[in-house]
Each structure stands twice: as structure tokens, then as C-alpha cells.
């Protein structure tokens, strides 16, 4: 069974950057769309960014111009480059493809 594993989270100061990775155990990213979601304490899970199999991307309004999603099909990995981080970006970030979800990676942005 294919699994998704996120990595790259951590603690960063406001204005800093992090790059999250989502690695799949099988070769699925070349044929499916992949999305990053996040969930902060007490809030609903929200879509951060998505990328289709053809490379078309979309972003949530709150991260447009700051975050970039990309994929490396050869490595079965999708990335989320996060720049100009804000305290309100603090959340657990999840990778999703079809019905598969990763375990999440914590991102904490200090002010």
C-alpha cells in the first residue's frame, strides 16, 4: 500500500523559510494531483496548495506569493517551499493524494 510521509517542519522565526517534503512509497505522483493542507489548533483544515499531474498549481489566498508547490516525479516527492512565514502559518501540515494522507508535520512560526 502506498504511503505518504511528510518532513521538513520545525520552528522558525517570522520572516523565515521552510521547505516541506512529501514522499510517496510508490510511483503515484506522476499521475495524480497532490495537495498540502494545514490545520491549526481549534481551526478547520484548510487547503494550502495543490499541483496536478500536468503541473498546474493553485494556492490558498493566505499563502499566494509566499508559498510554492513543486514536484519531482523521479523522486516521488512533492515540495512546499514556504517563504516570508508568519505566526498565523503555524499549523500541522498534511500531504494528500487521492484518499491518502500523511501523518503531518508541525510548523511553528514565532513572532
Image (spheres, helix red, strand yellow):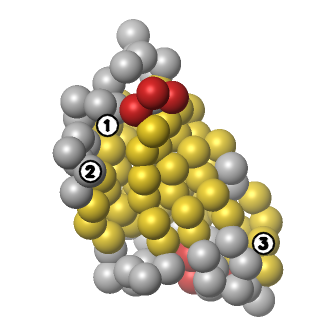
Q: Quadrant of the C terminus?
A: bottom right
| Mark 1 residue element | strand
Left or right: where 42 falls relative to 2: right
Residue hosting label 2: 55
In x, y percent, where is residue 32? Answer: 23, 35
Give how far across and how far down residue 23 sits, in percent.
52, 32
Taking depth in this image into account, of 91 and 17 the one nearest to the observer is 17
The image shows residue 75, relative to residue 41, as above or below, that is above
Placement of 42 over or under 106, stated as above or below: below
Q: In which quarter of the image is residue 26?
A: top left
Element under label 3?
strand
Distance (Cα) linking label 2 and label 3: 29 Å
- Name the side, left or right, on which 7 lies relative to 73: right
Find disc 3 in the rendering and name its residue. Answer: 12
Observer-side mark, 2 or 3, equals 2
Q: Does the rendering let one see residue 98?
A: no
- Toward the front, the furthest residue is 74
* Label 2 vs 3, first from the N-terminus: 3
| Mark drawn on residue 97 | 1
Residue 21 x %, y %: 57, 45
Amino acid at each position: 500500500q502506498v504511503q505518504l510521509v511528510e518532513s521538513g517542519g520545525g520552528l522558525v522565526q517570522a520572516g523565515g523559510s521552510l521547505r516541506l517534503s512529501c514522499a510517496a512509497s510508490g510511483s503515484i505522483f506522476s499521475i495524480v494531483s497532490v495537495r498540502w493542507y494545514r490545520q491549526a489548533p481549534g481551526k478547520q483544515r484548510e487547503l494550502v496548495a495543490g499541483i496536478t499531474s500536468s503541473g498546474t498549481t493553485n494556492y490558498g489566498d493566505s499563502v499566494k506569493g509566499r508559498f510554492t508547490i513543486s514536484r519531482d516525479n523521479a523522486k516521488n516527492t512533492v515540495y512546499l517551499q514556504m517563504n516570508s512565514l508568519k505566526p498565523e502559518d503555524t499549523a500541522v501540515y498534511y500531504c494528500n493524494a487521492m484518499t491518502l494522507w500523511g501523518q503531518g508535520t508541525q510548523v511553528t512560526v514565532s513572532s
